[in-house]
Amino acid sequence: MDVPNVLSMRKVLVYPLAIATATAAGLFATASAASAHGYVSAPPSRQAQCAQRSVADCGSITFEPQSVEAEKGSTKCSGGKEQWKVLDDNSRPWAVRSVGTTVPFTWTFTARHRTLNWEYFVDGQKVTTVSGNNAQPEAVVTHNVDLSKFKGKKTVLAVWNIGDTPMAFYSCVDLNIGGGSSGGGDTNPPPAPSPSASKPPTGGGGNTSPKPPTGGGTTTQAPPPPGGGGGAAGEWAPNVAYKTGDTVTYQGKKYQCRQGHTSLSSWEPSIFTLALWLPV
């Protein structure tokens, strides 16, 4: 075989390999960027209310409240993205939670990613920054944020800034600050969610447990409730308001609720183990 033919064959072999490698790299980068998901589940953020069907016509947010993702730096509930713009609509019947002046904000992560920090804003003013130490967070993280400088009905913008991408996740929470204890009820309580099935949030997470974030807010990595401390709730079912500590059985296994929530079809304990439920 002469030299020109050898070179030609090498081109035929090398070019497809280079294309395949570049394609795989692009897919990996896309998957990596999309692997992190999370939202404020308590007090109920606007997207949490969409997922509970207490606010209707939220589009895809109903099925993926954890996916309100946009570039860092936005001051909007939607992160400035068209597909999430319903979250910017203040005319919607968003439930307002009456709280004290120090409020625990609980993030639920359906997929965990290295974290730069969390930021909290009221009226466009930054309240506090909590460092993520560029580490992977727990499945459930709670920050106690001092809102004593802000009284009355306010919308708190909570932002989760990812550590190794230009992206962030946005959650808005409507509060009546100083209107009651942090565990107080809604001034506009949501109705029970629709029994129609919804798709579960997607994504997975690793098992790394970093040091608790440090910074302006007091942070706690939500510990599992003590064994036997909750009420027996029987067999798990959708459209039930579970409290922290409640115990259920699902597919022959026993679980204890890690944080209060209204269950949804396809959000079974086996899917949200460690995020919402702890095997006991």
Image: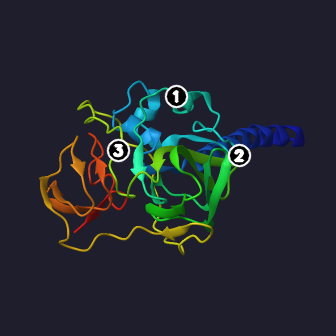
* For residue 271, side relative to residue 60 (left or right): left
Under mark 1, the amino acid is Val
Q: Nearer the viewer, mark 2 or mark 3?
A: 3
Q: Residue 14 appears at what percent x and percent y?
A: 75, 43
Q: Earlier in the sequence, mark 2 or mark 3?
A: 2
SS class of the residue under badge 2? Answer: loop
Disc 3 target residue = 186
Q: Residue at x 62, y 43 (%)?
A: 30
Q: Which residue is mark 1?
A: 86
* Cβ atoms at labels 2 and 3 below 8 Å apart: no
* Label 3–label 1 contact, CB within 8 A: no
Q: Quadrant of residue 191?
A: top left
Q: Is residue 261 above or below residue 136?
A: above
Q: Residue at x 67, y 45 (%)?
A: 124
How far is the residue under mark 1 from the one under mark 2?
Answer: 19 Å
Q: CA distance from mark 2 to mark 3?
A: 30 Å
Residue projecting furthest to the top:
57
Tell me the amino acid under the disc marked 3: Asp
Q: Which residue is mark 2?
A: 73
Where residue 112 appears, as percent x and y from the top left, is: 51, 57
**Residue 88 locus on image (x, y percent):** 56, 32
Describe the element under mark 1 as helix, strand or loop. helix
Query: Distance from label 3 to label 1 (Cα)?
Result: 21 Å
Looking at the image, can residue 116 be seen? no
